[in-house]
Image (cartoon, helix red, strand yellow):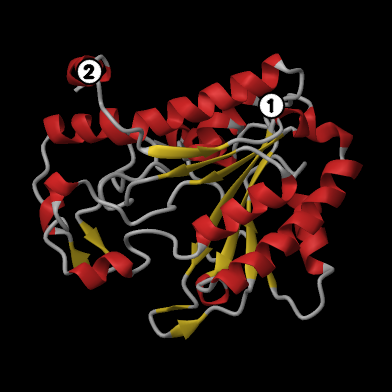
Amino acid sequence: MEQILDTLLQQDLGEKPYRRIDGDVGLGLLILCDHAENTLPEAYGTLGLRPEDLHRHIAYDLGAAGVAERLADTLGAPALLTKFSRLLIDPNRGLDDPTLVMQISDGLVVPGNIGIDANEIASRIARYYEPYHRAIDRAVETGLAAGKPPIMLAIHSFTQAWKGVPRPWHVSVLWDKDPRLAVPLLSGLQAIPEIEVGDNVPYSGQLKGDTLYRHATARGLAQALVEVRQDLILSPEGQEEWAERLAEVLRRVLAAEAALHAIELHGSNTDRARERTEAHG
């Protein structure tokens, strides 16, 4: 697969599979949205799914792009957002993750991904996955060159219920071992009246090889992932409301936490878990 990938990376791949929002590099903040769109390239059709299935959480994080855009605009921060559905390939997974290309998602078979071979996976990596990650690398290098190592904030959304069980949180912060951004974010959000704030729920921020692991944890950059409940951000008004809330909290955090822009290697709980597994293997 590596040889195939190298060949494809040399080709002209046409339109970029991500979009960039320009902002002030000196702010020291990079906003990411890994699951911004449900778009599939024309050649893939609907991957054999019904069109309505592409408007579900399995295809993208509903409302997340609107929050990320408005947050970037409010703060004047740069942002990167994907332009392809995670059903094609999930940019928030490591290359060795079995869910990189989902064949079954939320109990639904994805016909266009069944039996996918190494050549097709390599093609999707080269055309969609890697250009997005290289764009993040370039943004980080720009910040480092400007003398302001960027903190990273990824914006996602989660469904309001899972298997019929309501999820009570309005917003949640996902994080691994580095507390520099996550802990003050949690404190700031918890200070907002009548807001239920989750801590590493309904998902864990400890995912080996995900976007923040690859670009922030491994490089010693402060980071956190914010999940907003989807029913709260389906409308432009809801997206604006949550972008304003996040912006207010982030302004205070950026002003008060000088250590945010230091390069500190805190490591990952996923590394420790792997070490335990190997020790008892």
Where does residue 25 sit, x and y in percent of width and height? 70, 29
Point out residue 15 in the picture as x, y percentages from the top left corner.
Answer: 31, 33
Left or right side of 79 for 52: left
Residue occupied by mark 2: 11
The amino acid type found where label 1 is placed reads: Leu
Q: Specify whether residue 204 is in view.
A: no
Which disc, if any, is residue 265?
Answer: 1
Left or right, residue 245 beside residue 162: right
- Residue located at (32% from left, 68% from top): 55
Quarter of the view holding residue 280? top left
Q: Could you say whether the residue bearing mark 2 is in a helix, strand or loop? A: loop
Q: In the rendered view of the protein, which quadrant contains the C terminus?
A: top left
Is 127 in front, or is 193?
127
The three-letter code of the residue at mark 2 reads Gln
Which sits in the foreground, 5 or 178?
Answer: 5
Does residue 111 sit above or below 97 in this rendering?
below
Q: Earlier in the sequence, mark 2 or mark 1?
A: 2
Q: CA distance from mark 2 to mark 1?
A: 35 Å
Residue at the right extreme, as displayed: 256
Q: Is residue 86 left or right of residue 147?
A: left
Residue at image coords 81%, 71%: 192
Is residue 271 shown above or below 92? above
Q: Quick one: quadrant of the N terminus?
A: top left
